Image (cartoon, grey):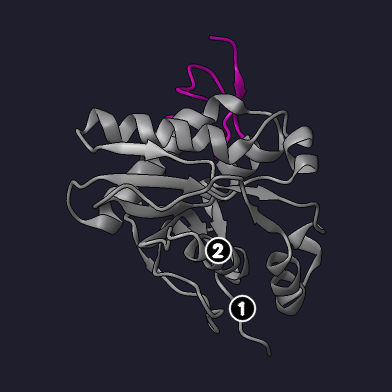
């Protein structure tokens, strides 16, 4: 019950629920999932849905979770990710969740696979709503430069060589929709590269689902 910084607005508050103040909780709950599409979209990018734009409390909460060790935020963020999955697919059906893997260096820096934690909570929330859900760790990620330092062409080149299928990877269960999960979409290069690798092994994603989508700024 001691005061702590809200992950969404960074104000010092007491009685935070899962590390987020009531005002930021209300803002996050008011977001409505919808389709997003980078422009230009890279070849192989499936249809993509996001909870909202990468800004405000959503951006701050993601940064607190990924980069500042606030691992308790995995539960509410995973629940929000489940809402995007449900909205993207439209009706209850068998689902195979495939998270984009962290590189080994990123996992060490973040004390574990941050998207793996989100995926577990996402799957749990969907199962509570009677969705038949499986999770498959389908890929390995090779070391690559931090995407923050790269332009669009650099992101595409790094993503193309970054992912390899795990041994014995097979097709999706009959009737299951393959849902590719990530936290943020910017250029779509990572999601497109992962989708192409999965497609080779009979796991073409029906949709890619993310929490946030960056908004491209027009050049002056």
Q: Which mark is residue 60?
A: none
Query: Residue 13, how many percent across, how many down?
Result: 55, 23
Query: Along the horizontal axis of the image, is 160 left or right of 79?
Result: right
Question: Which residue is at 53% across, 52% downward?
Answer: 182
98 vs 198: above or below: above
Say left or right for 111 vs 134. Answer: right
| Chain part drawn in magenta | 1-22
Q: Residue at x 73, y 46 (%)?
A: 103
Residue 146 coordinates in the image, percent (x, y): 79, 57
Seen as rendered, the residue at the extreme front is: 168
Is 59 above or below relative to 214? above
Tally of numbered tags: 2
Q: Is residue 5 magenta?
A: yes
Give the vertical position of 153 relative to 210 (above or below). Answer: below
Residue 43 image point, x, y percent? 54, 80
Q: Secondary structure at mark 1?
A: loop
- Residue 135 in view: yes
Query: Does residue 9 appear anywhere in the picture?
Result: no
Image quarter (top left, top right, bottom left or bottom right) of the C terminus:
bottom right
List the residue tagged with mark 1. Answer: 217
In this view, the residue in front, 134 or 128, is 134
- Magenta stretch: dominant SS? loop
Secondary element at image label 2:
helix
Q: Magenta span has 12?
A: yes
Cβ atoms at labels 2 and 1 below 8 Å apart? no
Q: Earlier in the sequence, mark 2 or mark 1?
A: 2
Give the residue at the far top of this rendering: 1
Disc assigned to residue 191: 2
């Amino acid at each position: 019950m001691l005061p702590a910084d809200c992950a969404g607005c960074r104000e010092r508050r007491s009685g935070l629920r899962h590390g987020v103040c009531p005002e930021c909780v209300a803002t996050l709950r008011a977001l409505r999932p919808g389709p997003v599409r980078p422009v230009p979209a890279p070849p192989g990018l499936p249809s993509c849905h996001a909870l909202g734009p990468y800004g405000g409390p959503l951006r701050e909460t993601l940064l607190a979770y990924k980069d500042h060790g606030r691992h308790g935020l995995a539960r509410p963020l995973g629940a929000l990710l489940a809402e995007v999955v449900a909205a993207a697919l439209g009706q209850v059906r068998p689902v195979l969740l495939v998270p984009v893997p962290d590189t080994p260096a990123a996992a060490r820096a973040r004390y574990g696979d941050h998207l793996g934690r989100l995926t577990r909570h996402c799957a749990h929330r969907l199962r509570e709503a009677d969705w038949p859900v499986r999770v498959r760790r389908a890929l390995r990620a090779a070391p690559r430069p931090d995407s923050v330092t790269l332009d669009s062409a650099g992101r595409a080149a790094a993503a193309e060589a970054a992912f390899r299928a795990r041994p014995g990877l097979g097709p999706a269960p009959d009737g299951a929709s393959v849902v590719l999960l990530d936290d943020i979409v910017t250029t779509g290069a990572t999601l497109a590269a992962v989708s192409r690798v999965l497609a080779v092994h009979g796991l073409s994603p029906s949709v890619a689902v993310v929490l946030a989508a960056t908004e491209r700024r027009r050049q002056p």
